[in-house]
Image (spheres, rainbow, N blue to C red):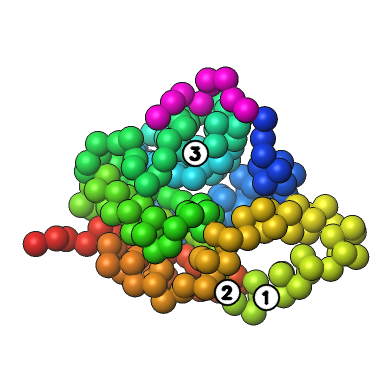
Amino acid sequence: MMPASSSVPEPTEWERAYLRFETPEQEIRKFESRLRRLGADDWPRDAQIVEIFCGRGNGLRALHNLGFTRLEGIDLSPALASIYDGPGTVVVGDCRQLPLKSHSRDVLIVQGGLHHLPVLPGDLDQTLADVARVLRPTGRFVVVEPWQTLFLHLTHLACASRVLRAASPKVDALATMIQYERATYESWLGQPRQILDLLHHHFEAEQESTNLGKLMFVGRPRRRE
């Protein structure tokens, strides 16, 4: 683990595309709306919340706007983590081995990070097990990830169109991100059954849906005998 303020390398091409996909304000509004749909209005405002794969930290800003004050973020990218200067703290770390004490946090959130794991299902199993370790028994794990639906198929067709990429900077940024993460992205989309089985192995689902190209999941750690 290292502080986000340490000297960092230049952003990668994927990171540059991510940064231009949405403005910070657009991303924060999206996250606020999404978190409300996932039940954030019912969480205690003093809950200890960690966002893993937090990127530039706009999920933390959204949580702060919703009234939460005990916020942490973890991301593997020094370039992205160094951007964050909001309430809470962001550190650089590997989410497969979280730098957090067992049973010490109330909510862990991931919004579009698990599909970057290089080895499935092994890395996913390791990450989920460590999330379950860190959560208190009454804690929640919140997951938002891409999912193969008709909507996502149509999105992929748009990304394959040179005309649409030229006309829309957002489509071009998304197509660029997919290009640079293609191996892990396609591996993730190709293993829906294994992914759901692992989520259900480690967590008891409170919410679960696969609509509009997204898996949205909220679960509590399973009790182990």
Label whose residue precedes the other's in the sequence (1 or 2): 2
Which tag is nearer the camera, tag 1 or tag 3?
A: 3
Looking at the image, do the residues carrying marks 3 and 2 touch, with CB atoms under 8 Å apart?
A: no
Q: Does the magenta stretch include residue 154?
A: no
Quadrant of the snapshot with the C terminus: bottom left
Looking at the image, do the residues carrying marks 1 and 2 touch, with CB atoms under 8 Å apart?
A: yes
Mark 1: few/some/many CA within 10 Å (<14, 14-19, 20+):
some
Element class at badge 2: loop
Look at label 2 and name its amino acid: Gln
Numbered label attached to residue 191: none
Numbered label attached to residue 148: 2
85 above or below 38? Answer: above
Instruction: Report the Cα–Cα distance between label 1 and label 2.
Output: 7 Å
* Residue 174 at x, y percent in the picture: 72, 56
Residue closest to the eye, 115 or 54? 115
Which residue occupies 34% across, 42% down? Answer: 97
* Residue 224 at x, y percent in the picture: 14, 60
Mark 2: few/some/many CA within 10 Å (<14, 14-19, 20+):
some
Which residue occupies 56% across, 50% down? Answer: 32
Q: Give the range drawn in magenta.
A: 1-9
Look at label 3 and name its amino acid: Leu
Which residue occupies 57% across, 20% down? Answer: 7
Looking at the image, which residue sits at the far left?
225
Which residue occupies 45% across, 30% down? Answer: 91
Q: Mark 1 = which residue?
A: 153
Mark 3: few/some/many CA within 10 Å (<14, 14-19, 20+):
some
